[in-house]
């Protein structure tokens, strides 16, 4: 299950993010999205859980949890919309 994590502190790193989700199940990946120009965090990330049940439990547990002084917004990631090519 792919999980969207929003409202991240810019100081949060991928290891810290992974550590927040690991108590709820196996984390396949944790990726903080960064700005291409500056390399700085854009304030959101995606976490991939190996099991849908664990993913749902993690969403329940981590949503609205405070990390780095920010209250996280966590939900199931929506599929990426196809952009039309011109």
Image (spheres, rainbow, N blue to C red):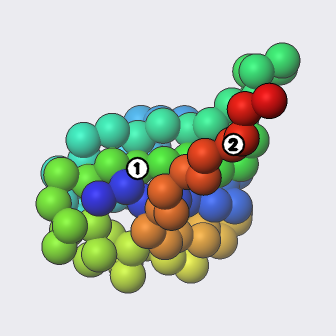
Q: Report crowding for label 2: few under 14, some 14 to 19, many 20 or more residues within 10 A (C-alpha).
A: few
Left or right: 73, with 35 as reference point: left
Of all residues, the one furthest to the front in this rendering is: 86
Q: Report crowding for label 1: few under 14, some 14 to 19, many 20 or more residues within 10 A (C-alpha).
A: many
Give the vertical position of 46 relative to 61 (above or below).
Answer: above
Asked whether the viewer can see residue 55, the reply is: yes
Q: Earlier in the sequence, mark 2 or mark 1?
A: 1
Residue named by callout 2: 83
Left or right: 21, with 10 as reference point: left
Specify the quadrant that holds the N terminus: bottom left
Give the vertical position of 86 relative to 49 (above or below).
Answer: above
Residue named by callout 1: 47
State which quadrant residue 51 falls in.
bottom left
Query: Is label 2 in a helix, a strand or a loop?
Result: loop
Specify the quadrant that holds the C terminus: top right
Query: Is label 1 in a helix, a strand or a loop?
Result: strand
- Give the Cα distance between marks 2 and 1: 23 Å
Q: Position of residue 73 (x, y in %)?
A: 60, 71
Closest to the camera, between mark 2 and mark 1, is 2
């Amino acid at each position: 299950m792919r999980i969207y994590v929003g409202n991240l502190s810019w100081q949060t790193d991928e290891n810290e993010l992974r550590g927040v989700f690991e108590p709820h199940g196996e984390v396949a990946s944790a990726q903080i999205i960064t700005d291409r120009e500056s390399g700085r965090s854009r304030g959101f990330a995606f976490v991939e859980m190996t099991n849908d049940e664990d993913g749902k439990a993690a969403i329940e547990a981590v949503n609205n949890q405070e990390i780095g002084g920010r209250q996280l917004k966590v939900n199931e990631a929506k599929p990426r919309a196809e952009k039309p090519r011109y």
